[in-house]
Image: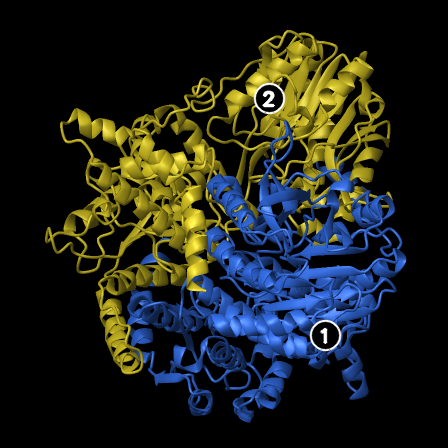
Chain colours: A blue, B yellow
Amino acid sequence: MDEKIYTLTEMIDDDLGGKTLSESQKQEVAEQLKKLVAPDSIALAQINPTSGDVKGNALKAYEWIKWAQRLELDALVFPEMYLIGYPIGDFIDRFPLIVEENIEWLKALAQKTTGKTKVIIGFAEFNKTKGGKKYFNSVAVLADGKIERTVRKSLLPNYAEFNDYRHFEPAIVDSANRITCLGQNKAGIIVCEDGWNDFDFFDKNLYGVDPVETVVNQQHPDYLINCSSSITRAKKEQLKHNMLSFAAKKHSTPIVYVNQVGSNECLSFEGASRLYDARGKLIAMAKSYSEQFFIVSPSQGGKIYPLPNGLEKTLNSQKAFTLDHEPDLERTYLTIVQTIRDYFKKTGFKRAVLGLSGGLDSTVSAVLLADAIGAKNVFGISMPSKITSSESKNDAKQLAQNLGINFAEISIKDMFDSTRAKFDEVFDAIESNWDCRYKECFTNDNIQARSRALILWGVANEFQSCLPIATSDKSELYMGYATINGDMSGGFAPLADVSKTKLFALARWLNKNRAQKNAIPEAIIAKRPGAELAINPQTGKPLLAEEALMPYEFLDEVIWRVENLQQTIGDMMQAEFLHEKHLKEQGEPLSKEQKLEWLKKFFRRMSTALYKWSIMPPSPIVDARSINKAEYKHPIISSGINYHKTSFEEKLQQLKLSEKNS
Amino acid sequence: MDEKIYTLTEMIDDDLGGKTLSESQKQEVAEQLKKLVAPDSIALAQINPTSGDVKGNALKAYEWIKWAQRLELDALVFPEMYLIGYPIGDFIDRFPLIVEENIEWLKALAQKTTGKTKVIIGFAEFNKTKGGKKYFNSVAVLADGKIERTVRKSLLPNYAEFNDYRHFEPAIVDSANRITCLGQNKAGIIVCEDGWNDFDFFDKNLYGVDPVETVVNQQHPDYLINCSSSITRAKKEQLKHNMLSFAAKKHSTPIVYVNQVGSNECLSFEGASRLYDARGKLIAMAKSYSEQFFIVSPSQGGKIYPLPNGLEKTLNSQKAFTLDHEPDLERTYLTIVQTIRDYFKKTGFKRAVLGLSGGLDSTVSAVLLADAIGAKNVFGISMPSKITSSESKNDAKQLAQNLGINFAEISIKDMFDSTRAKFDEVFDAIESNWDCRYKECFTNDNIQARSRALILWGVANEFQSCLPIATSDKSELYMGYATINGDMSGGFAPLADVSKTKLFALARWLNKNRAQKNAIPEAIIAKRPGAELAINPQTGKPLLAEEALMPYEFLDEVIWRVENLQQTIGDMMQAEFLHEKHLKEQGEPLSKEQKLEWLKKFFRRMSTALYKWSIMPPSPIVDARSINKAEYKHPIISSGINYHKTSFEEKLQQLKLSEKNS
C-alpha cells in the first residue's frame, strides 16, 4: 500500500501517545487516509495494557477505536486479554471483581461500536457452564452497539512464563463461531497458542487438535486473525516467523498476527504485528517495541518496518553456544529498556538510585536506566570502602559525567567500622556458646555490600517515587556470587538475565550505537571483573571474580547448556567447550580434572544459589530460558541433590549394601 | 485389629527412624506381627520424601519395603510422586536427568520385590507417546522382580499450590490397568486428585470425568487405594473426610487413602492416612505429622489414632469469621514446627539466629524454633535502639532464659548514628538535585530494622549452617508493615501465614500446652504491638501498630474476607464485622466513614505490599488461603488498580467524557 498511509498513521500514533491533534487536524488526517487505504483494510492495535487496570485499558482502547471509526476501517484488532491485561496471574481468582469490571467495560465499549467498524478485543470471560475452571480466555467481536460473538481460546499454554491453564477452561473449537464478516471478507479468529499446534510444522505437539486447521477446513475463511500476547525471547522470532509463514502457505490463507507491545513486570512483548499472504510471504510488519495503530490490507499487505537486530539476525540461529553476542544486542537493549520504563511507569516510580562501583554491572545498569527513565531521574552513588581503588572511583565519576546522571561519592568506612565493632562484640558472645565460627573474609565482604544497600534503600525511603537498583548479572546469580541485602537487593534488577560475556559485548555495543558515543569509559570494559570486597592472599590484589569462580567464558557456556540443552555433568564432559578450544589454540589445553572441578563447582554453587533466586526483585526476561521467578520455579530444598548420573549397577550395589547394613 | 499390632509397629517406626533394631529383634517383631495381622493386611508407607533427592528417597523406601516383606504383607503403598519427591516444580523440565534417575531407581527397587508383597509407589514417568507434555504423574506396581503395571494420573490440579498440569500429561482413565491383585483382593488404584471429582458430592466439578466411578463401575474392585500428596490447610480435613466417606459409601467400596507426611519447603503434609469401609465409616487412621509404617486390613480396619485439634475440631467449620482461633491452634503449631524442622534438615541448616525485640512476633518465632530445631541451636539477640524500652529488653531476656535458648544483647546505637551521619551527607547531596525529599520518620525507623538484620546476616555468615529468621506476621505483611532488608529479611519466615489475632491466641496456647508451661512472659502477650521504631507525636510514646494501621480485629477480618469470600470494598461495607459488633456492644458504634477509610487503607496498603510479598523468604502455608509465593502469584504492576466497583452508567459516562475531550 501507499507509503503515505504510514506517514499519516504516525500522526495518529502521536495523537494516541498524548501529542493530541485538534479536531480539525484529526478530520484532515482521516479524510486523507480514507482515500489512500485499500477497501479491505483493517487496523491492528499494537498496544500496551497494564495488568489489572481495566478502566485504564478500556479508556485507552476507546481512543484507538474512535480512530478506526473515523477511518471507516472494517475492523480494529486488539491483542489477547487486552482489556484485563496480560499476564494477570492469580489476581483474577482472588478478585473476581476485576473480571466483572472487564465484562462491564466490554459491554460499554460495545455500545460505542458502529455497523461499519468491528472491534475485536481480548478479555477474560466467566465460565458459566456447569464444570471446569472459572474463566475463559476470550476474544469478543463488537459491532453495531453489541457483542456480536465471543471466541474462546482452546489451547492453553502452561509452561515457562505461561500459566493459562491455571485460570482458564480450554474451549472446544467451535469453528463456525470463530468466523466474523469484515467488509466483504470472512475472517477466522484464533487466540495466540491456538495458532501454535500445526501437526506438520512441529515434530512434537503439545495438544491433540489444531484449531487453525479446523477453522480453515470447516469454514474456508478469507483470512485468519491471530490475537496474541507473546513475549520476546532470544531466537524465538525465527520459530514464530517460520511457523506463521508455514501455516499461511499450507492453508493458502493469509494470516494477520496482532501482538501486544510493552512490558508487564518481567514479561516483555515486542509487538512486530504482521501479515502473511496466502503463499506464506510476509507482506506487512509493524514496528517493534512501540505502540502502533497499524493499517494493513489482507489483499494488498502494508509497510514492512524493519526488525531490530536480534529479532532479524537470529532468524537462522545456530544450535551451538557462541560468544558472538552481537546479533542479539539490539533486541537485548530494547527489551531491557522497555521493561525498566514500563515497570517504573506502571508502578508509579519515577527515579532510580544505584551504587556505582566502577565495575561493569553497575555501569551498564546506569546506562540502561538513563535511557529508560531519563538521566536526570537517575542517581549514581560511589560508595568506596578501603579496598576500593582510586581508578574505580574515577571511572564511576567519569561515567556519571558522561551520562549526565546525578552523582555523589560517600565513603562507607565509618559504617563498616561501627558495624564491624558490633560484629566483634556479638560474635565473641556467640562463640562462647557455638563452636562453629568461620572467621572467613566473606563476613567483611558482605558488610560492605550491605552497607551500600542500606544507603540506597535509605535514599529510596527519603525521596519520593525512588527505587534502588539491584545490579547482579545472570552469571553471578547462577553462582550465588551476589550478596543478600547487598548488591542483589533492590526494587528492580535490569541485568538478571544477561550473562557476563554478553554484558561485555553489550557495553561495547552501547558505546558504539547510542546517540552519545563512548559514554562508558574504556577502562571499565577493559578491566577484569571483581567485587573489590576482599584481597586475594595469593596476588595481594583485590580478588577477581574469575579467581573465585571460574572463567566467565566457561561459566556462560555451562549456563547455556543447562538452559538450552538440559545437559548434565556427564554430557558436558563429553562436549568440547569454546573455552577448551581457545585454550587448545593457545597451546595450554584444559585438563579433564580442571573441567570436572569447574562443573562440580557450578552445580554445587547453583544449588545453594536457589534461595537467592527466590528473593530476587523483578527483572526483564531476555534469554531463551531464564531463572526468573516468573518462568522458573525450583524447590529450594532440592539444594542437596546430586546432578551426577549413576549407573544401574551402582544403584543395585547401593541397595545390596543397604541389605548388609540392616 | 489387635491393638498389639500397633505397639509392635511403633518398634518398626523406631527402626526406620534410625533407632536401629538388631537382626534378631527384627525377626522377633516380624514373627509376632505375622501372627497378629489379618490375612488381607497391607501397609501404608506414610513417609517424608525430599524433593529431587531420588537416591535418598529410593534407599529410604527400600528400608520400608524390607519390613513389608519380612511381614509378608500383601502390599506396601507409598504416596504420590514419592520417588522424585513432591512438589518437584520446574526442576524436572530443566533437569530430565532427575527423572531418568527416578526411573532407574524404580527398576532397581522392582528387582528387589517378591511375589508375595507388592510395592505401590509414586514416580515421574516420561511420556513416550507422540504428543503432549513431557511426563506423566504415575504410580507403579512392583512385584516379583518386575514393574507389573504403571497407573497414570488423569486429573491434574493446577490452582493454588498445585501445578500438576504444568509438567504432566493427563492420562485417559484405563480402568482395567488400574486393577492389581493384592492377595485374594482386587485393588483399584487412584492417584490423589483422581479421587476428588465426584459428581454427586461437589456442586461444581473441575473435570469432566470421575476416575473413581469409572474404575468401580467397570472393574468392581474389592477396595480402592488412593496414593496422595495432599497438604494440610485450615478447614480442609472436613472436606476430605466427608468426600472420602461419601465415595466409599456411594460405591460400596472401601477406600485406602495414603498421604505424604513432612514438609517440602512451604508445603506441609499432615499424613493421617486412613481407611473407610464400604459403608463410608472411618475404620483406621494413622498418626498426624509423623512418619508411620501403618498396617491396615481392608476387611477389618485398624487402629484409629486421634487427629490433633484443628484437624478434628474444625470438622464442622463455620463459614463466618471468628476470633476463636483455639480450635485450629494445635494444627497450626504442628504445621509450623514440622515445616521449620524439615526446611532446616533438607537444606542442611542446623542453627537459627533471630532478633528478640520483646514483641509478640519474635517471641512466638523463638518458641517455635526452639521446639523445631532445639533450644541450643537458637540464638536470640536483643538489639535495642534509643527507642527500645527497658521492659522490652527485660522481656526478651526473660523469654530466652525460660526457653533455654542462647541470648546476647547488643546496642545498635553506634550503627544507627554512623549510618544516620552518612545518610545526612548523602541526602543533602541528593536534595540539591532532586526536590522530592520527605524528611519523614520512616527513614530512621528503617535504619533500625536494617541494622538489626545486618547483624543477623553477619552471624549467619560467620557461623556454620546458621539461618537468620524473618519474624513478620500475616497481618503486617498484608499492610506492608515490614521493612525490606529488615524484619522481613531472613532465610525463613515462620509466621508469615499467621494473622495477629491468631498469634495472640497461639502465644497463650503455647504457654498452656507446651511441656514447659508459661515460657512466654505474660507482659509480652499483654502489651499492644508496636515496632518501637518511632515515637507517636500524639501520645509521646512509641507508635503502636494499630495506630499506624487499624485495629487488628478489623484488619484480620478483612484479610479473611478477601481470602475466603473474595469480597470487595462494596461487599464488606454491606457486612457487619465482628469489630463493629463489639464496638456496638460497648456503646461506641463504628461510623461508616471510619469503616470505609479503613477498607480503603487496606486495599491501598495491600497494593503497595505486593512487591514485599515477592521477596519473602520461604514460610509455612497454614491458612485456608495465603499470600505465600508457592500459592499466590500476583502481578506487582497491578498495584495501582482500583478495587472499587463502578456502575455501568458511570462507565458509559466516562466514555462520553472521553469523546468530549478528544
Badge 2: residue crowd in 10 Å (few <14, some 14–19, many ≥20): few
Q: Quadrant of residue B334?
A: top left
Report in which chain the residue with disc 1 lies.
Answer: A
Q: Secondary structure at mark 2?
A: loop
Amino acid at dot 1: Lys
Residue depicted at 45% across the width and 70% down the height: A469
Q: Is residue B636 above or below residue B85?
A: below
Which percent across, then down, holds residue A482? 51, 68
Residue depicted at 40% across the width and 39% down the height: B568
Q: Can the viewer see residue B37?
A: yes
Badge 1: residue crowd in 10 Å (few <14, some 14–19, many ≥20): many
Report in which chain the residue with disc 2 lies.
Answer: B
- Judged by depth in the image, the label closer to the viewer, 2 or 1, is 1
Q: Quadrant of residue A380?
A: bottom left
Which percent across, then down, holds residue A27? 54, 70
Taking the image as shown, residue A348 lies to the left or right of residue B187, namely left
Q: Is residue B508 above or below residue B239?
A: below
Q: Is residue A464 above or below residue B342?
A: below
Amino acid at dot 2: Phe
Which percent across, then down, holds residue A256? 74, 60
Q: Is residue A182 above or below residue A19?
A: above
The residue that mark 1 highlights is: A303
Mark 2 vs mark 1, CA separation in Å:
55 Å
Taking the image as shown, residue B82 lies to the left or right of residue B455, namely right
The one nearer the camera, A153 or A316, is: A153
The one nearer the camera, A111 or A227, is: A111
Q: Which mark is residue B202?
A: 2
Which percent across, then down, holds residue A299? 80, 65
